[in-house]
Image (cartoon, grey):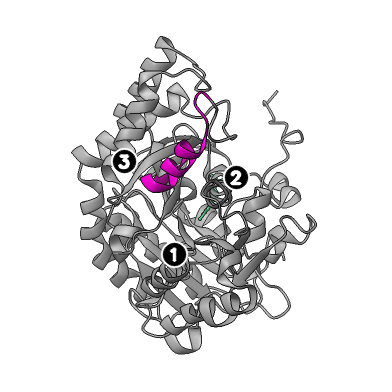
Amino acid sequence: MPNVLDTSHFWMPFTANRQFKANPRLLASASGMHYISDDGRKILDGTAGLWCVNAGHCHPKITAAIQQQAATMDYAPTFQMGHPMAFEAASALVSIAPEGLNRVFFCNDGSESVDTALKIALAYHRARGDGLRTRLIGRERAYHGVGFGGIAVGGIAGNRKHFGPALPGIDHMRHPLDIAKNAFSRGLPQHGAELADELEQRLLALHDPSTVAALIVEPIQGSTGVILPPKGYLQKLRAICDRHGILLIFDEVITGFGRLGTAFAADFFGVVPDMITCAKGMTNAAVPMGAVIVRQEIHDAFIDAAPDNAIEFYHGYTYSGHPLAAAALLATMDVYRSEGLFDRAAAMAPYFEEAAHNLRGLPYVKDVRNLGLVCGIELESVPGKPTARAFDVFLKCFHDKGVLIRTTGDIIALSPPLIIDQLQVDQLFAAIADVLKTQKAVPQLEAAVA
Ligand SMILES: Cc1ncc(COP(=O)(O)O)c(C=O)c1O
């Protein structure tokens, strides 16, 4: 009797469960740039898992560090206790963070890092006697994870509409995607920096700056299809926040750890926020971990405001600074440094850009946008069936071409491990090109997920 996998009990996240379970796509092992599917096919990973396996899969140094730590000390609390590796991990993170951001609060993933940062922002203003600053500002089409804080400042209708009002006192700026003006821009779009002005001219004029605690932005909006900041836009946001005492949070859950060829997008853009949220690449995804990296003044405001022997910040997770995650982080930082992976990504970026823009002119390609080792390919939607075209390309790439891509709406988003070589870049884009060339006006999906 063949051993048939029972897929019924796992309620899969962000998945069309019925469609998937009718024809499961199963991964069995991984190494370097590849997955091996359960039927033994080699799949090129064009998405670093979910934007997270930056050093490539099953890196032996990271695997060994986790194995050794699991056998030495499986778990240790960090509430009123500690273990050396958590402190070493925080120092390692600070060593690559922008100057001035030197205090680290650990959590377990990107969603927790966002909710932690929002709580820090609110409590920081209160700790320094400015507790009327309770408003938080995000952007349309932003993805900040799935916590109630994250969906409140996030700007994806589908992630918000089912769950009630989430947090009060939230407002949103417009997103800066403008295909009409910026289609097929290579690197940063030329047009749109002025959209940053609406923070001051519309939102702060409406709410008054004295009520606003923080603005949170992804330097690149990844999950809704690679929306790049126009030239000068992030610099303008920084200046406006400075003028009005508003904290600027960069959500670097996908842009951190070399994705743009620098440690953080903050370095790439030369804009230093007050807090960075991160996760994913910080352990090469081998153990879940997230963090908020904070300016020292913010941390010190908490410490200084609390009486002796009192807990300064009523927040934390059982697994904050988990020993396995800390071990994975230390090994990952070592790999990034010793293998020069951030520089490697920077060196590969022009080749990746060229390959991406060669898709221009293929059927249904509406826009290509790229920065570092990130690329978004926006396709014309099938009338009345949004998502159907990109999902069809995704299925064909996986089943017929042995290439894993990711899609969101009708946009293909690519974010390969930083170790990708030129032949693999060629393979990735050739697979997408081949599939696009044979696209039908209305693709016959296994099952549409509109
Ligand atoms: C910018 C951003 N923030 C937060 C998150 C949430 O991270 P997680 O899925 O680890 O909770 C993501 C996930 O993709 C993200 O892209």
- Circles 3 and 2: CB distance less than 8 Å? no
Q: Residues within 10 Å of mark 1 (few under 14, many from 20)?
A: many
User: Tag on residue 111?
Assistant: none
**Percent position of residue 139, x then y:** 57, 68
Of 353 and 224, which appears nearest the observer?
224
Front position among marks 3 and 1: 3
Mark 3 and mark 1 lie on one chain; the one further toward the N terminus is 3
**Seen in the image, is 373 located left or right of residue 113?**
left
Any mark on residue 94, and which?
Answer: 3
Which residue sits furthest top? 72
Is 3 in the magenta? Answer: no
Q: Where is 238 relative to 1, above or below?
A: below
Question: What residue is shown with label 2?
Answer: 25
Q: Residues within 10 Å of mark 2 (few under 14, many from 20)?
A: few
- Please, is residue 37 above or below residue 443 in the view? above
Q: Amino acid at mark 1?
A: Ile
